[in-house]
Amino acid sequence: MELKLQQDDFLPLRNVVFNTLRDAILRGELPPGERLMEIPLSKKLGVSRTPVREAIRMLENEGLAITFPRRGAKVAKMSEKDLDDVLEIREVLDILAISLSCDNMTDDDIKRLEDAAIEFEKATKGKDVRLIVTKDEEFHRIIYECSRNSRLVTILSNLKEQMYRFRFEYVKDPSNYPTLIKEHREILCALRARNKEQIVTLTKTHLVNQMECVREIIKRQE
């Protein structure tokens, strides 16, 4: 398979290699079970083994790769168990974050969230899936930050890495965009109205809709 390094002068080389490999995995160019061997990858990308080794560790942190003792690394398969584990944690933390945000959000925060919702909708009109995922993450990041709980924000930021592959799979299908846009608007309206009970319900629905869609994708791949 041809791999082309995604050059970025502003990022450390390990991050450039990581982004290149991650995109190849998410697009299916490096399929589940594919071996990630340092020497062949370093030759294909024109870099030394060190940034490749570091990038593979970063892929492991996102659940995109798995390393076996004395056998090297492989592209990880998505599993329903991984999905359930991440969802179980995220649901609890998202509900806590959005409940706190409901109490703490200012008018300026609401405006920031409105702008983020608009930016997400604009992104869905294009074909850049990474951009769409980024704009979706930004919408939720604003909510997390408005919890005014820095430790909670840090935990959710770390969990975001575990969610990335599942979120990407969901966003790859344009038929899901109307649902996502609708749910973002509903969450925004509920926050504006300070309706905490409705916000919790909407948050659960938002998560379940995404995860059930990804669950079907996993079943088809298996």
Image (tube, rainbow, N blue to C red):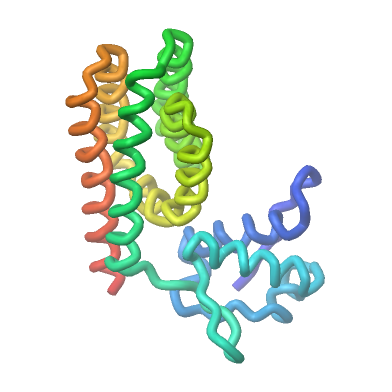
- Number of numbered markers: 0
Residue at image point 34% right, 65% down: 82
Residue 138 % position (x, y) = 48, 32
| 173 over 193 or under it: above or below | below
Q: Residue furthest bottom?
A: 70
Left or right of 97? Residue 64 is: right
Left or right of 127? Residue 180 is: left
Q: Quadrant of the N terminus?
A: bottom right
Residue 109 % position (x, y) = 46, 15
| 220 over 181 or under it: above or below | below
Q: Quadrant of the C terminus?
A: bottom left
**Where is residue 24, by image quadrant?**
bottom right
Along the line of sight, the residue nearer the viewer: 211 or 20: 211
Residue at image point 22% right, 18% down: 195
Left or right of 90? Residue 3 is: right
Residue 124 % position (x, y) = 41, 33
**Where is residue 20, by image quadrant?**
bottom right
| 168 over 222 or under it: above or below | above
The answer, for residue 122, to whether it is visible in the render is no
**Where is residue 220, by image quadrant?**
bottom left
Residue at image point 34% right, 30% down: 98
The answer, for residue 85, to whether it is visible in the render is yes
Residue 197 % position (x, y) = 18, 26
Residue at image point 45% right, 24% down: 146
